[in-house]
Image (spheres, rainbow, N blue to C red):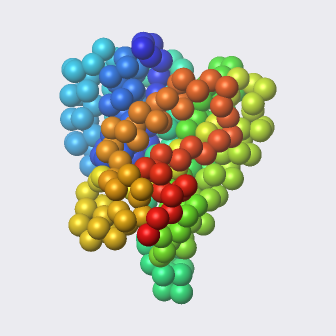
Amino acid sequence: MLTNKVALVTGAKQEIGLGIAKEFAKQGANVALVDHNDEPTLKKIAQELTEEYAGECWPVMADVSDPQAVDDCVAAVVDHFGHLDYAINNAGGGILKPFAELSDADFNQTVQVDLFGTFYCMRAELKQLLKQGGGSIVNTGALGSIYNPGGMGAYNAAKNGVIGMTRAAATDYADQNIRVNCVAHGLTKTALNAGEFLEKVLPTVPMKRASSVEEVAKVFVFVAAEATFMTGQTILSDGGAAVGLKG
Ligand SMILES: NC(=O)c1ccc[n+]([C@@H]2O[C@H](COP(=O)([O-])OP(=O)(O)OC[C@H]3O[C@@H](n4cnc5c(N)ncnc54)[C@H](O)[C@@H]3O)[C@@H](O)[C@H]2O)c1
C-alpha cells in the first residue's frame, strides 16, 4: 500500500493519465490530478476518487507547456500535501502526419507539449525531490517513437527526447535517492485509438490486442513505487510488438 505517499499525475483528466491516478488512489496514495482544460470534470473526478479511496485526490489546473504554470503547480501540490513522492509526466499527444507534410506549427505544438512540457515538469519536480531528499519520476514515451509505424516525425522527435532526458536526469541524481524512468507503451485502448487506426496497427502486435488502460497504469505505478533499483530505463509494455515485429 502507498498510504501517506503523494503522487502527481499530469494529463489526469482522461484515459491513461486517469487510469494511473486511479491506480495510485487504489493503493491508498494521495494524488494530485493535473490537467489543462475542463476544470469541472477534473474536480468531479477528484471528488469521486476521494470518496471511493482512502487517500485524497486533489485537482490542479496547469498547462505543462507553460513553465511558470508548472512551477506553480508543483509548489501548490507540495504546499497542499507537504511533499512529493512520485511524479508521472503523462500529458502528451501529438500531430501525426507523414514527415514532409508537417508544418512548423504541427512540429512546434507537438514538441511544446511532449518535450518541453516534460522538461518543465521534470525540472520543477527534481528541484522538489532534491530539497526533500528523494523520490521517483516516470516519464511517458511511446513504442511508436522507437519502432515507427509511420507518420510520427514530430511525435518521434519529442518522445525520443523524453527518453534522452530520462537517461540524463537519472545519471545526474542516481546518488541522491532520485530515480527517473520512462514507460513507452504500445497500442492502448483509448478513444483516440478506436476504429481504423486500431485495425491498422493490431496486426503488428503479437498478442493481437491493444493494452487496456489499467494494464498500462499498473506498469507506471510499479516503476514509480516498486522498482527501487531501476533508474534511467525505458520500459516497453507493448504486447510483444518490439520483439515480434510481425506483419
Ligand atoms: N493511447 C496510446 O495508445 C498511447 C500509446 C503510447 C503512448 N501514449 C502516450 O500516453 C500519454 C497519454 O495518452 P492518452 O491516449 O491517454 O491521451 P489523451 O489525449 O486521451 O489524454 C491526454 C491528457 O493530457 C491532457 N493534456 C494535453 N495537453 C496538456 C497540457 N499542455 N497540459 C496539461 N495537460 C494536457 C489532456 O487534457 C488529456 O486529459 C501521452 O503522452 C501519449 O503520447 C499513448
Residue at the image point whose x is 48% and y is 81% from the top: 98
Residue 173 sits in quarter: top right
Q: Quadrant of the N terminus?
A: top left
State whether residue 190 is above or below residue 80. below
Please state which of residues 22 and 13 is positioned toward the viewer in this rendering.
22
Please state which of residues 57 and 214 is positioned toward the viewer in this rendering.
214
State whether residue 69 is above or below residue 59. below
Residue at the image point whose x is 51% and y is 58% from the top: 244
Q: Is residue 51 left or right of residue 114?
A: left
State whether residue 113 is above or below residue 178. below
Residue at the farthest bottom position: 100
Residue 34 sits in quarter: top left
Q: Is residue 131 left or right of residue 72?
A: right
Residue 112 on image: x %, y %:
54, 62
Residue 20 on image: x %, y %:
38, 36
Residue at the image point whose x is 22% and y is 42% from the top: 40
Residue at the image point whose x is 21% and y is 28% from the top: 48
